[in-house]
Image (cartoon, rainbow, N blue to C red):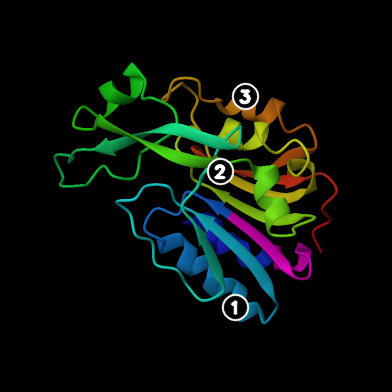
Amino acid sequence: MKMLELLPSLLPTFGNPIHVIEPGMNDGFHTGIIARILQQSGRPFVYVGLEPDPRLRPAIPPGVTFSSQAIGAKDGKATFFLSEGVSKEGHQYTGSSSLHPPSDMLLTSYPQMRFDRRIDVDTITYDTLCKGYGMDWVDFVWCDTQGCEGDLIAGGLEMMPKTQWFFTEYAAGELYLGQAVIDQIKASLPFMEVHTDWGGDILFKHRDVVIP
């Protein structure tokens, strides 16, 4: 992924120690790559990864702290919609679970994907998460939350303005009911600007960050 190729060049803008948050670890594949990049920098870091789906057992690299909570707009509990099914190519649809129910657009686009099961999960806001780990700032967020991007921002009114880099997936339409689409995400981050837009993935930079 191009974001991972770009990440090493952002390290000079990161603090000491480096603070990284990853909501939505899935199987931990990207977690391992990011952790290796941080380890190779030789700098101390605090890395917190979240994955609320109990079916997924992400690999936890050294230096990464795992939480089974979901990032939400409020602290507490919420319904989590579990994605299931298999594509015609044999791809398992276990990576699209969300706090938001699927829309007709999503189900039409992926007719083999199902959301027959729901579970209750613990939710935590971005602000509460950062405070719990003593983070006064965050250098980098890798956000893969399947329609919950707006929830992260809504629960991070204090800490999002103290976040240097924010990488997230986005949709132009409402794949999940109530999700924030890209124009809404941009409007909710007036202190950030778009660094790179790959079409479906986007990297925001805090306006105060100076790239050497």
Which dot marks residue 168?
2
Spatial CA span between label 1 and label 2:
23 Å
**129 left or right of 14?**
left
Q: Is residue 168 magenta?
A: no
Which residue is found at the position 78% from the left and 55% from the top?
A: 137
Circle 2: element type: strand
Q: Which of marks 1 and 2 is nearer the N terminus?
A: 1
Mark 1 packing: few (<14 Cα in 10 Å), some, or many (20+)?
A: some
Residue 164 rendering spot, x and y as whole percentages: 75, 51
Q: Distance between the residues labelled 1 and 3?
A: 35 Å
Left or right: residue 122 compared with residue 14: left
Q: Which amino acid does label 1 sit on?
A: Gln
Q: Mark 2 Cα within 10 Å, few/some/many (few <14, many 20+)?
A: some
Q: Residue at x 82, y 53 (%)?
A: 209
* Residue that label 3 marks: 183
In the rendered image, which residue does mark 1 sit on?
Answer: 39
Q: What percent of the width, then of the height, locates residue 14?
A: 75, 64
Q: Which of 32 and 47 is in front in this view?
A: 47
Q: Is mark 3 on a helix, strand or loop?
A: helix
Badge 3 local density, few (<14 within 10 Å), some, or many (20+)?
A: few
- Give, as a three-letter code, the residue at label 2: Thr
**The magenta stretch spans which residues?**
10-21
* Three-letter amino acid code of the residue under disc 3: Asp
